[in-house]
Amino acid sequence: SLHWQALLTARAIENQAYVAGCNRVGSDGNGCHYRGDSRVINPQGEIIATADAHQATRIDAELSMMALREYREKFPAWQDADEFRLR
């Protein structure tokens, strides 16, 4: 669960984007167990909606394009992008 939470947060921050991580609850036929912990994270890495662990539920979150644009203008990390070429 810590990996799930940390990686979703990292994706939101590094991509300066909202991230919705949806995870199932229960066990599958192969003996893998899933705890849920679905969540929506904003570009700053803050959780804006979360589901309880081990419980099937629905979560709602309001995403703001205006807030996203304002954040990207204040912190223009995309300008540091390198041009990658494979040969």
Image (tube, rainbow, N blue to C red):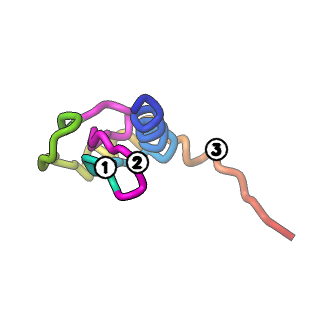
Which circle marks residue 10 in the picture?
none
13 and 2: which is toward the camera: 2
Coordinates of residue 60 in the picture (x, y in percent): 13, 48
Residue 73 visible somewhere in the drawing: no
Name the amino acid, label 1: Ser
Image position of 60 (left or right of 6): left
Q: Is residue 41 above or below residue 21?
A: above
Pointer 1: residues within 10 angstroms few (<14), some, or many (20+)?
few
Q: Nearer the viewer, mark 1 or mark 3?
A: 1
Q: CA distance from mark 1 to mark 3?
A: 42 Å
Image position of 32 (left or right of 66): right
Coordinates of residue 4 in the picture (x, y in percent): 42, 38
Circle 1: element type:
strand
Marked residue nearer the N-terminal end (1 or 3): 1
The C terminus sits in image quarter: bottom right
Residue 10 visible somewhere in the drawing: yes
Q: Which residue is mark 2?
A: 32
Q: Is residue 41 magenta?
A: yes
Image position of 70 (left or right of 58): right
Circle 3: element type:
helix
Residue at the image point whose x is 25% and y is 47% from the top = 25
Name the chief secondary structure element in magenta. Answer: loop
Q: Nearer the viewer, mark 3 or mark 2?
A: 2
